[in-house]
Amino acid sequence: MSTLSIQNLSTRNLSDVTFDVHQGECVCIHGESGSGKTLLLRAIADLDPSEGSVLLDRQERNTISAHDWRRQVTFLPAESHWWHESVSAHFTSKVPQFKDLDLNPEIIDWQINRLSTGERQRLSLLRALDHQPTFLLMDETTANLDEENTLRVEKFIRQKLEQGLGIIWVSHSQQQRLRMADHAWKIHDNTLIEE
């Protein structure tokens, strides 16, 4: 079982963040807007500068190429970004799990500009999982979804947890954290506090 270990990590907003996430676990983080939640995820993913250590199975992040690290420890931003015109160009898998997220299988042939905000958000989750990460860092992944699709995504994520995916999920929703979190942390006064 793989472990993602964050040790004494400091970012622009936070200091001395220390916790572990194991495969099959969901750690939820919340805090006020601007408290540093996204910066923390980006630092773990090695997208923003930080001090301290992040290890995957006791191997220091700085001993793994950035490309390989981000493939294993994938950051899923709150707002999805698309760099090709078609949906299919963003996937390596021939049959993504569209039906699990109530997406029309024909969506693979659509142009990005045809997609709704909710479709883009669900597709960005599938795109992140297409690379088969060991850990997924999710930043408000269901923020733009209605309740039905939010619950559908949560069910899908539970299946991925059962298959061994480890997750750090930033969520403002207390109900979502109660439903999903194995461990919950709150950012308060530049400190991450376990709840």
Image (spheres, helix red, strand yellow):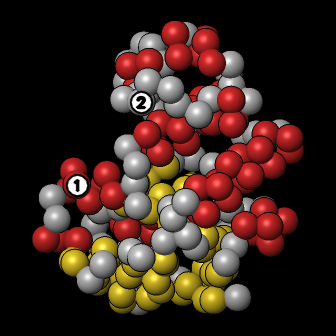
**What percent of the width, then of the height, locates residue 192?**
56, 85
Q: Residue at x 60, y 70 (%)?
A: 26
Q: Quadrant of residue 84?
A: top left
Vertical comparison of 190 with 158: above or below: below
Q: Residue at x 59, y 62 (%)?
A: 161
- The numbered dot on residue 23 is none
Image quadrant in which the C terminus is located = bottom right
Location of mark 2 (residue): 93
Q: Quadrant of residue 180?
A: bottom right
Q: Quadrant of residue 45?
A: bottom left
Task: Name the side, left or right, on which 150 lies relative to 134.
Answer: right
Q: Earlier in the sequence, mark 2 or mark 1?
A: 1
C-alpha distance separating marks 2 and 1: 19 Å
**What percent of the width, then of the height, locates residue 59?**
22, 78
Vertical comparison of 105 with 22: above or below: above
Task: Name the side, left or right, on which 124 lies relative to 102.
Answer: left
Location of mark 1 (residue): 68
Nearest the viewer among 50 and 163 is 163
**What percent of the width, then of the height, locates residue 127?**
47, 36
Classify mark 1: residues with Cα within 10 Å, few (<14), some (14-19) or many (20+).
few
**What percent of the width, then of the height, locates residue 158?**
68, 59
Q: Amino acid at mark 2?
A: Ser
Q: Residue at x 49, y 49 (%)?
A: 76
SS state under label 2: loop
SS state under label 1: helix
Task: Name the side, left or right, on which 129 lies relative to 139.
Answer: left
Q: Are marks 2 and 1 in contact (CB under 8 Å)?
A: no
Residue 15 visible in this rendered orientation of the protein: no
Q: Nearer the viewer, mark 2 or mark 1?
A: 2
Image quadrant in which the N terminus is located = bottom left
Vertical comparison of 194 with 144: above or below: below
Q: Amino acid at mark 1?
A: Asp
